Amino acid sequence: MTLVFSGNDYKYQLEAVMKLFIPAERFELIYTDRAVPVSGDYAFMRKTAVKGRMLVYAVCQIGGKTSHKSAVIRDTTEDIEDTCQLMLCRLLYTVMSELTGITSGWGMLTGVRPVKRVNRLIASGLDREGVISVMKDKYLVSEKKADIAYRTASVQEYLKQGLDGRSFSLYVSIPFCPTRCSYCSFISQTVASGRKLIPDYINKLCEEITYTGKLVSELGLKLDTVYFGGGTPTSFEAPQLERIMQAVSRSFDMSGVREYTVEAGRADTITEDKLRAVKVNGCTRLSVNPQTLNDSVLEAIGRKHTAAQFYEAFELANKLGFEHINTDVIAGLPTDTPESFDRTINGLIDLSPDNITVHTLSIKRAADLNHAKGKREVLRSPAGIMVDSATEKLLTASYRPYYLYRQKNMLENLENIGWSKQGAESLYNIFIMEEIQTILAVGAGASTKLVDLKGGRLERVFNYKHPLEYIRHFDLMLEKKKEIVDFYAEKE
Ligand code: SF4
């Protein structure tokens, strides 16, 4: 398909709107100030000045069907460029929606963090009705999605209060898993293929933890939350986990830590000695993730455990007395149905964990699984029905949405939502999604996010992605981490 930009350079925004309808396509791009002949499917998006006004219009042709929309904007406002860009996106969205029959609950919002936009609207003085009406009218967001974004922002409001510019969270990356799930798009290695690397990886990881601890004490920063993620951290044996966690407690002042999460992820990695090891070393929040409670779906996605093993792992975690337990599920997994997804949600609500996180499968992963399916067919999966039903059930069971984000290419342009019982929200998840606290990250694939709320700065320092690169180029990488010191020096 060809995208023609005429009189404007809104490539990034307009292409993102097109991807809401045709996610996996590579577009041919043409920039021109004139009308050009294009054959086949195309979208032509023009902005032009006419007698002190701006005329914007979008014309699209798909499969021989054509539709167009236009608008005139008075060129009197200072932010005329933003107004034209927004209007052109809205026109393009409407035309494409007419031609494809596809609508997105998030309308033409393409960003990862819709709640940030809601927060800005609240800060501008709007109440609930005001926020919902802007989300609906300006961004074509549905009432349901606007409501859930508003609820999420409201839950976050009091949790974000009193954040101090010297506090930070620590992320520890363990990018290993027992086997690879078929929908996975992360860079994680199976324990079998990476076995030889693991001892060196742990040595380097502990070294990076010690190094980061020194930086932190020189800079006078305060550790607030800790998060062990992956991969599946519990792919490692109990003594290995213990060694890494002890490196953390030796290197940092743990007295102010409000939350300590370890992702136990897959039930097939969970054993009593591992859970005891992480608990004794400070873990307060454990994540045990079934993804689905339907055994045939688990088999279809290549997770080598059953629902029964998840229940056993959950019971064990409960018995050992972790303060909070999170469970993750994914809507839209291959072979799953709305009825079976409902049973998964009901099953989890019966277990009553503090947090339930409802993810939606992303099309990148779905596409790997469903080569035979057309791209647009993937967009019409039952994931939307699953997510709507889960939302109703979780609200009825008194869970509250507390963080929400979107990834590129999610089925039906949906979202991931973390649900929580009141008072059991994960602070780390809010901080990382809303980008309101520095995250110092260690390990392969980890990325440090330096946040200066007052100065409005956000900088990132990336570690090497693969464990082998991480081990090989370790000294070079530590050198780069000096950027953390520079960031705080500039912040003074
Ligand atoms: S457990 Fe998670 S990170 Fe590991 S292979 Fe499966 S989806 Fe990927």
Image (spheres, rainbow, N blue to C red):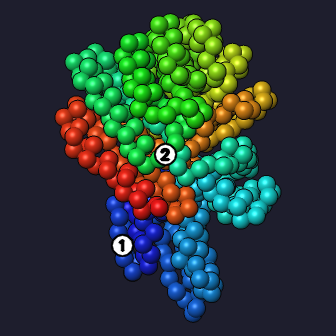
- Residue that carries the numbered disc 1 in the rendered image: 31
Amino acid, disc 1: Tyr
Quadrant of the drawing holding the N terminus: bottom left
Residue 9 spot, x, y in % from top left: 42, 72
Relative image position of residue 177 (x, y in whole percent): 37, 21
Q: Residue at coordinates 74% horizontally, 32% vertically from top-left?
A: 422
Mark 1 residue element: strand
The response on whether ligand 1 sits within 8 Å of label 2 is no
Residue that numbered label 2 is attached to: 221
Q: Whole-percent x and y of residue 327?
A: 59, 23
Would you identify the image quadrant in which residue 289 lies? top right
Give neighbour class at mark 2: few <14, some 14-19, many 20+ (Cα, 10 Å). Answer: some
Q: Position of residue 357 (x, y in %)?
A: 60, 30
Circles 1 and 2 in contact, beta carbons < 8 Å: no
Given residues 160 and 20, the one toward you in this image is: 160
Q: Quadrant of residue 187?
A: top left
Numbered mark located on residue 450 in the image? none
What residue appears at the point 32 percent right and 47 percent down from the top-left corner? 481
Outermost residue toward the bottom in this view: 51
Label 1 near ligand 1 (CB < 8 Å): no
Identify whether 150 is placed above or below 44: above
Dot placed on the residue nearer the N-terminal end, 1 or 2: 1
Q: Is residue 164 visible?
A: yes
Foreground tag (1 vs 2): 2
